[in-house]
Image (tube, rainbow, N blue to C red):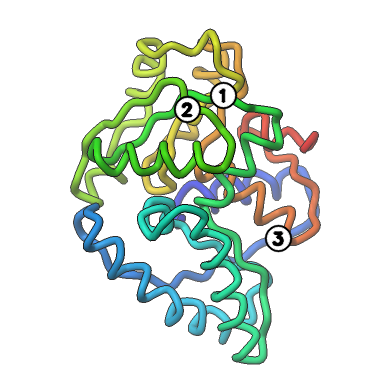
Amino acid sequence: METEIPALLRAREAIAPERFTFHSARMRMKHVTKEELAAMDGDSDRCALELSDARVDVMGYACLVAIMAMGLGYHCQSQTRLQGVSAGNGHPAPVVTSAGALVEGPKAVGAKRIALVAPYMKPLTELVVNYIRNEGIEVSDWRALEISDNLAVGAHDPMNLPDIVRGMKTDDVDAVVLSACVQMPSLPAVPMAEAITGKPVLTAAIATTWQMLRALKLETRVPGGGTLLSGVY
């Protein structure tokens, strides 16, 4: 949340008049396990309350798998609750989640069938795949990189991703999710992956940025943001 989403919005500043500031509240997690994810999500109300003190214009809940681990369709429940927290503090703000964005983003580009790369262990990746399938999008191929340490996820080299995509079956998909995690860097690899597959390539960070811009009623054109942030959607 604190790296690629600001990078995308800074890139947008080069072509549009709006300027952005970034404010963070952290939910604690060290290892990407279902137990730590549940504890992390339980802290989200506090974070929303703290951020609403700053009178932010939009909030983004960055941890995709923390939402998805709470049950099918939970992103809708979470967004509604956290919006209520900010409204109760007198500073209402729309809330988007990376989980919801990774459902709505593929639908926006017309994708009914995707291939997906995630940094999580296999059981959590299967949970993500099932969550997305429950939202009406088929996941025909997926890769779990099985990185359990959260800091190691953030340190993963994005230039590993094009070769991973080359080894996947993408000829029958409508889009590729290059990183199903805002924490795992992927932006430098997006143009390469689009060239390799000939398909729209999106990431959790790209999709979350897209939803934030829509919540702010701003143009969704961001250089380097792939097909979803071309300004068409």
Looking at the rendered structure, which numbered label has been put on residue 113?
1
Above/below status of 196 relative to 64: above
Work out how far the residue at label 1 is from the one at label 3, CA to CA, in angstroms. Answer: 35 Å
Q: Position of residue 79 (x, y in %)?
A: 57, 67
Q: Is residue 178 left or right of residue 106?
A: left
Give the mark toward the camera: 1 or 3. 1
Query: Mark 3 is on which residue type?
Result: Arg
Looking at the rendered structure, which numbered label has been put on residue 157?
none
Please name the residue shown 33% across and 37% down the image: 126
Image quadrant in which you'd find residue 18: bottom right
Above/below status of 132 relative to 162: below
Residue bearing mark 3 = 19
Above/below status of 84 relative to 39: below
Image quadrant in which you'd find residue 146: top left
Label 2, residues with CA under 10 Å away: few <14, some 14-19, many ≥20 = many
Query: Mark 2 is on which residue type?
Result: Val
Please name the residue shown 60% across and 17% down the image: 199
**Towards the viewer: 100 or 207:** 100
Element assignment for label 3: loop
Query: Mark 1 is on which residue type?
Result: Arg
Residue bearing mark 2 = 139
